Amino acid sequence: MATSTTFLTLDKKGRATLPEEVRQALGVEAGDFLLLERTDRGTYELVPATLVPNDQLWFHQPEIQARVRRAEEEIASGRSTRTETPAEAQIFLDSLKRTPRRRH
């Protein structure tokens, strides 16, 4: 893998300007967030980041992510039911309430 070196100069407040080619390579522009992560080797990496609104934090919890992965696997394997209308969906959901479910 080819590498390149870019030197940055800090101003009195500790700020640096990323060269245009670095901003393009990272896909960032003015106002974007970057994480400065320390690696296992003791170096630092700049990683483009996005803030998650508080009302969406639940989705990023490990348990929820695991449930989403399981659901996606079930859909991909054909273990899902598709309905065409809200009424069909409600009938299907109601049938699940009446059917005793086996415990795993």
Image (tube, grey):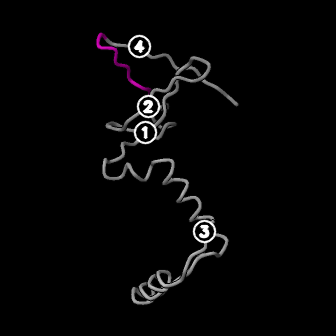
In x, y percent, where is residue 23? 45, 34
The magenta segment:
12-19
Whole-angstrom CA distance, mark 1 to mark 2, is: 6 Å
* First in sequence: mark 1 vs mark 4: 4
Whole-angstrom CA distance, mark 3 to mark 2, is: 44 Å
Q: Quadrant of residue 66?
A: bottom right
**Residue receiving disc 3:** 103
**Kind of residue at badge 1:** Ala
Split into 4 quadrants, where in the image is the C terminus?
A: bottom right
**Kind of residue at badge 3:** Arg
Q: Which mark is residue 9?
A: 4
Whole-angstrom CA distance, mark 1 to mark 4, is: 23 Å
Q: Is residue 101 above or below residue 9?
A: below
**Nearer mark to the viewer, of 2 and 4:** 2
Whole-angstrom CA distance, mark 3 to mark 4, is: 62 Å
Give the secondary structure at mark 3: loop
How many C-alpha atoms fall within 10 Å of the one at disc 1: few (<14), some, or many (≥20)? few
Comparing 103 with 11, the one in front is 103
**Kind of residue at badge 2:** Leu
Q: Is residue 63 above or below residue 27?
A: below
Comparing 58 with 103, the one in front is 103
Give the secondary structure at mark 4: loop
